[in-house]
Amino acid sequence: MKGYIIFAHGSRIESANTGVRDLVEQFCSTGGHLAEPAFLDLAEPNLARAVELLVQRGASEVVVIPYFLTLGLHLQRDLPELVAGVAARYAELTISIAPPLDGHPALLDAVLDRARESA
């Protein structure tokens, strides 16, 4: 069974973290997916705990979807290191990282929608 982690930075502003958790709930209810949120910093759960929760729920494969716009330092360095550390604890688990949101065709549509909303 495949599980997904929506991986965000985390914030001291709890409403920002709640927004990520709400997105995960929508993701699960819309597609029937098994998913958990995870945060790099400042919020819980962290990546290791989110993987643990998915494994407990039956996941044998995990895809980490970065909730970041660009492939910056956190995605080039920090996330691969975190995934490698977690993968070392779960030899039977396949963990992969999806690309960041940058370059996705729907991103332009989202920006255009925001521009129209502000007019």
Image (cartoon, grey):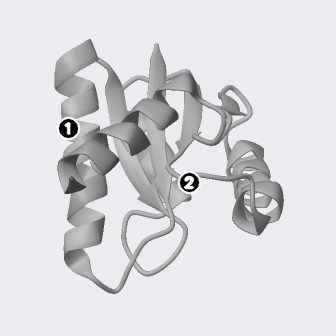
Residue 55 appears in the figure: no
- Provide residue 102's location: percent of width, then percent of height: 63, 42
Q: Work out whether 108 lies above or below 75.
A: above
Badge 2: how crowded within 10 Å, few (<14), some, or many (20+)?
Answer: some
- Provide residue 41's location: percent of width, then percent of height: 51, 76
Which quarter of the picture shows residue 31?
top left
Query: Which of 106/48 is in front?
Result: 106
Residue type at the position of mark 1 = Glu
SS label for mark 1:
helix
The residue tagged 2 is: 68
Residue 73's disc is: none
Query: Which of 32/110 is in front?
Result: 110
Badge 1: how crowded within 10 Å, few (<14), some, or many (20+)?
Answer: some
Q: CA distance from mark 1 to mark 2?
A: 18 Å
| Residue at image coords 55%, 68% | 40
Left or right position of 38 against 30: right
The residue tagged 1 is: 25
| Residue at image coords 44%, 56% | 38
